[in-house]
Image (cartoon, rainbow, N blue to C red):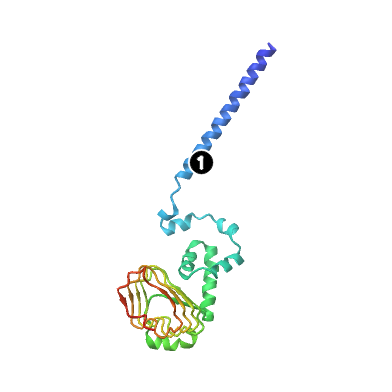
Amino acid sequence: MFKSVASESTEGHESREMSRKRGAGDEKDEDEEAILEIPLAESLPISTVVSTVPATTDQFMFTEDVKRLLVGLVVGDTLMILRLATKAWKRVVDAFIDEGVRSGEFIVHDGEDIGFMGAWKLKERRKLAKRVIFLLNITKVGEYACMFAANLVVLGIPEGVERIGKNAFGNCHSLTTVYFPTTLIEIGYTSFARCFSLDNVDYLHTNLQELDGLQY
């Protein structure tokens, strides 16, 4: 009798243990299915990606000081993307850009022409500029956009830009390196006039059809 009860108890325990494991397995399968159903961020519009970012993600990944340091190292078009990432990034990036613009260290360019007179009025302020931030989705660099930026050394023109306007970077005497996008079709007349330090230019990967502007 004792043996029978013990056996029944053992069998009951084993049965409960198997049920528990099966339940755990079912939960695991459900979790795996849920993970598989999450769409890739690349397949979603930016508004959807932004809205699905957990509120705590930014808080434990980066402190404010680390973000300020990183923002100081990334390229201009990436800065504009970071403004969309989370509210926490936007606070840091906006403050970083605003301070750079206020001090004259940054030129924020929207793709519009400013003309010679516009450039002349900004001549002294342009001499303070060390970096150009291009707004998202522009297709050209405007005429005279960054003329007289005598302390600009390295320039990265983002993908999507097809044309560089006349005298866009004229008189940028310290400019040594320019990174052109693959989308570039035209470098306008005297776009890089009097850029005497320019010695690192690679445009073989572009779709250039007109090359008037590299007469420096």
The structure residue drawn at horizontal position 60% and vertical position 65%, both measured from the top left corner, is 66
Up/down of 166 relative to 158, above or below: below
Which quarter shows the N terminus? top right
Q: Please provide percent x and percent y for residue 50.
A: 47, 58
Up/down of 117 relative to 77, above or below: below
Q: In the rendered image, which quarter is residue 202 located in?
A: bottom left
Secondary structure beneath label 1: helix
Question: Are there few (<14), some (14-19), or many (20+) residues within 10 Å of tag 1?
Answer: few
Give left or right: position of 62 versus 52: right
Give left or right: position of 59 versus 53: right
Q: Residue furthest top?
A: 1
Q: Please provide percent x and percent y for residue 59.
A: 59, 59
Which quarter shows the C terminus? bottom left
The structure residue drawn at horizontal position 53% and vertical position 38%, both measured from the top left corner, is 28
Q: Residue furthest left?
A: 209
Up/down of 181 relative to 117, above or below: above
User: Quick one: 163 or 5, which is closer to the camera?
Assistant: 163
- Residue at the spot of label 1: 31
How many marks on residues?
1
Q: Please provide percent x and percent y for residue 6.
A: 67, 17
| Tag 1: amino acid | Asp
The structure residue drawn at horizontal position 30% and vertical position 76%, both measured from the top left corner, is 210
Q: Please provide percent x and percent y for residue 80.
A: 47, 68
